[in-house]
Amino acid sequence: MYADIVIDISHESLDRPFQYRIPESLVGQVQPGMWVLVPFGRRNTQKKGFVLKLGTKANIDPDRIKELTEIISDDNSSDKTRIALAVWMYREYGGNLIQSLRVVMPARKNVRPKQVSFLVRTSDEKRFLDYLDLARKKNWKGRVRLMEALLCRDYISSAFARQQLKIASDAIKALEEEKLIQIETKRFYRSVLPKESASLEKKQLNEEQQAIVDKLISSYQAGVRTPALLYGITGSGKTEVYMHLIEWMIHQNKQVIVLIPEISLTYQVILNFYSRFGEQVSMINSRLSDGERSDQLERARNGEISIMVGPRSALFTPFSNLGLIIVDEEQEGAYNSEQIPRYHTRETADKLAQLTNSLLLLGSATPSIESFSRAESGEYRKFCLTKRAVLGSCLPNVQVVDMRKELASGNRSVFSRELREKMEECLAKKQQMMLFINRRGFSRVVSCRSCGKPIECPHCDVALTEHLGDKLVCHYCGYTKAMPRSCPLCGSPYLAGFGLGTQKAEMMIKAQFPSARVLRMDMDTTSKKDGHEQILDSFRRREADILVGTQMIVKGHDFPGVTLVGILAADMSLYNCDFRSSERTFQLLTQAAGRAGRGMEPGNVIIQTYDPENYSIQTAANQDYESFYHQEIRFRRRMQYPPIGWMCEVMTVSAEEELANQWIWHVQLLINKRFCDIIKIIGPSDAPIARLKDMWRKHLYIRSNDHKAYLEAMELIQEITEQAAAQKVSIFVTVC
């Protein structure tokens, strides 16, 4: 018996299966999907490997085939679905196969299961009471306390006995030797659920919501698995639609994956789901400890939970009876993996749904252009929610403020006159507000007023960001240094910070509104494990009047007390070097505006911008997605950008700039030679950040309307990637 095994070595030249003989003692135990230990190389170094498939035929001389050493993971689920998904990701997104397998089926960490021991009464009652009388006469106080406690119940935990009853180990041992008690252990799973949860009543669906739920259920029963897009205005009750669908799926003994884009959303979502489904729900994210994460995956394998909530990694939960995958806020860039394989969660979820015969449901108030285009063409089913779920609630009043006019009138503050007035009014009425600025830190950049040069990161081609405490930080590699007293280049003492970040905004708010209670939410304030939960819970309990933060405050949160949203710099994301900059600006502004007026009180939104005529800002102010879509799709069609054509970014990365440059030009020449005019090439050029963590980066874009030619180009790039690895040059492909 033989096994095809992928060796856990991140090197492209070894990215293929190797055949090993299964020893007789392990025949029947080794299964596809297992991690095993195998001898590798001339020295037979023991390496981890992943079993892809089994067979009875040797591919080479049987005498040359080495023998598998041992099984190092007890995961014998034989999950062919997830293996197939990993193979698809490898072919679709590049990298190497073991990297895809690590993402889809990560090896279990060496985590010790948490055990709870119990002291259990074993003898008959008469013998137990006789010994209790003896213990009282002998004045064995510890034994007496323990035995009296066990008269009321059949067992108590060892921890309770030691900590509450103050029972010494000698007393427990003595009773165990007398065979009056025995010690039993039970597996205890680490809890990741909220310690407390309000009991939320099941909400009655409105006509729109009920019609969508009924349609999705009836089509599912009829065997229809076409992906569905749930498109609804902010506050229209998409979550309640999810809840009703999940409830039906659980009644069908199906399991559900709910994906959310940000860890900051986990707390609110898990509270809602826990209040409805109790212990059937769990969550997984990067903030969990190894033990907590391992326990949740184990519960999923054992079928002890039915719902898994989390960011993109939750997609790979080892459910055996998956029925529904929900991708909430499907337009979010956080669903794009920055690590190899650079997969997109929406596309990968679609493939998983196909492999498991599940339903994929995408939800958003601002769908991605790609998803809405597929819905318009009939590739996805489209369902619309046109009104807010809370009776009497309506979309907020939105005002666009031209900051050019504010500047001309002498107002140099970051707060327009309109925003300041609304903030004062809001505070007077004891209502809450949110202020959004999509940049953390105190100021954007520190530069010298004499020579004009910014202070840059020594490892990345970016300027350092000023933080409070006279600290300069690189937001890409984490490099930190103290604020210098003079310019490192010219020696001038005239250094100053420019731009606006969340820290500076918080300071200015406190200066202008000293009585206001202010919370700040960004990467700096949420670095601790429970940072998100503490801030959001505090704001929900109305312990603060103003919440200022980055984009993590504007996505999916529901605070009925918020009646004002201020967007301090609406065009901050508008002119990035990305063809999606208008789309992302529209999405951010629409989502931010949607946080206001979700309760019974009417909401107001102030959008501050230096480009008020821009169509993405105008349509966001009107909450008019379809007008934005039609204008944006015309631009995409004219430029042949996705979803009209296929496009990807190719990047070379090397410690030597010359090598990175040579290989990106090599890619360009080979693609031009083979595909001529079928594939268009933009570049090569420096990447937007030319040097990151001391690695040089060059890139180009390829695009084509011919899908077959595009896929062939991907295969060619994969071949070049393997050649470049010999010179320690990495080539990455990011699908657009």
Image (cartoon, grey):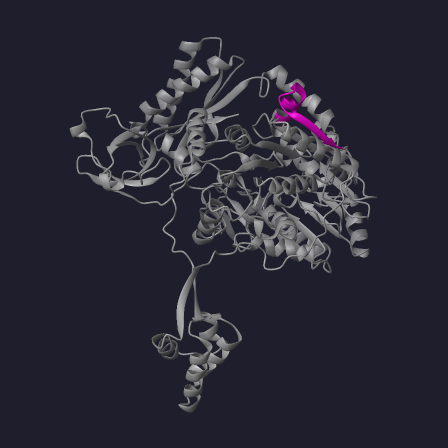
Q: Position of residue 528 (x, y in %)?
A: 52, 55
350 over 535 or under it: above or below: above
Q: Residue at x 38, y 77 (%)?
A: 175
Q: Residue at x 46, y 46 (%)?
A: 478
User: Extreme top residue here?
Assistant: 677
Q: Image check: 458 left or right of 443?
A: left
Query: Is residue 286 shown to the viewer in this render?
Result: yes
Q: Position of residue 272 (x, y in %)?
A: 65, 49
Q: Image check: 223 left or right of 544?
A: left
In front of the other: 64 or 577: 64
Quarter of the view holding residue 674: top left
Q: Which quarter of the figure is the N terminus placed in?
A: top left
User: Extreme bottom residue here?
Assistant: 137
Quarter of the view holding residue 663: top left
Q: Is residue 384 magenta?
A: yes
In front of the other: 407 or 17: 17
Read off the magenta span: 371-385
Q: Position of residue 265 (x, y in %)?
A: 61, 46
